[in-house]
Image (cartoon, rainbow, N blue to C red):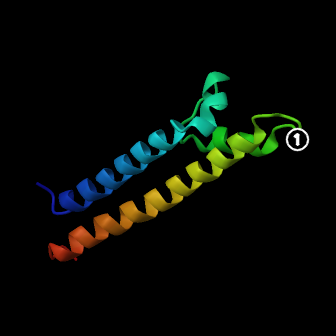
Amino acid sequence: MPKEFAGFLAAIFVMILAGISYKLITKRDEFKKLRDSGQVLNLNIALLLFSFFREEDDELKKAHEKLAIIGILHVILGTALAVLAGSLVSYYRGEY
């Protein structure tokens, strides 16, 4: 088993939790109209950034922008926490 396995496992675990957290947030009632309109509510950055280019009079713009900000924060913070968790596990195991 590679020395870094525990660190990679911790990092993967954090990323999975970030994805689950985002999916639970998309289940809120405030995003019901987005779900009903057929929008893909995932962590695809290209689709999240599309929300900022919607027409001003679009009734879904505000909810889509809010969800995009939440999604982008999940990606950024999830990645940072995954790297931190992986590094800490490897450090405490004496691999660095």
Q: Quadrant of the C terminus?
A: bottom left
Q: Nearer the viewer, residue 51 or 3?
A: 51
Q: Which residue is mark 1?
A: 56
Residue at 61%, 44% in the rendered image: 45
**Which residue ends up furthest to the front in the rendered image?**
29
Amino acid residing under circle 1: Glu
Q: Residue at x 35, y 46 (%)?
A: 16
**Looking at the image, is 44 positioned above or below residue 10?**
above
Residue 83 at what x, y percent from top left?
A: 37, 64
Coordinates of residue 8 in the picture (x, y in percent):
27, 56
Circle 1 packing at 10 Å, graded few (<14), some (14-19), many (20+), is few
Residue 95 image position (x, y, % from top left): 18, 73
Work out whether 94 lies above or below 8.
below
Residue nearer the viewer, 64 or 1: 64
Image coordinates for residue 75, horizontal then vertical, percent: 51, 53
**Dividing the image into 4 quarters, which one contains the N terminus?**
bottom left
Q: Check disc 1 and report its element: helix, strand or loop.
A: loop
Work out whether residue 3 or residue 67 is closer to the camera in this orientation and state it. Answer: 67
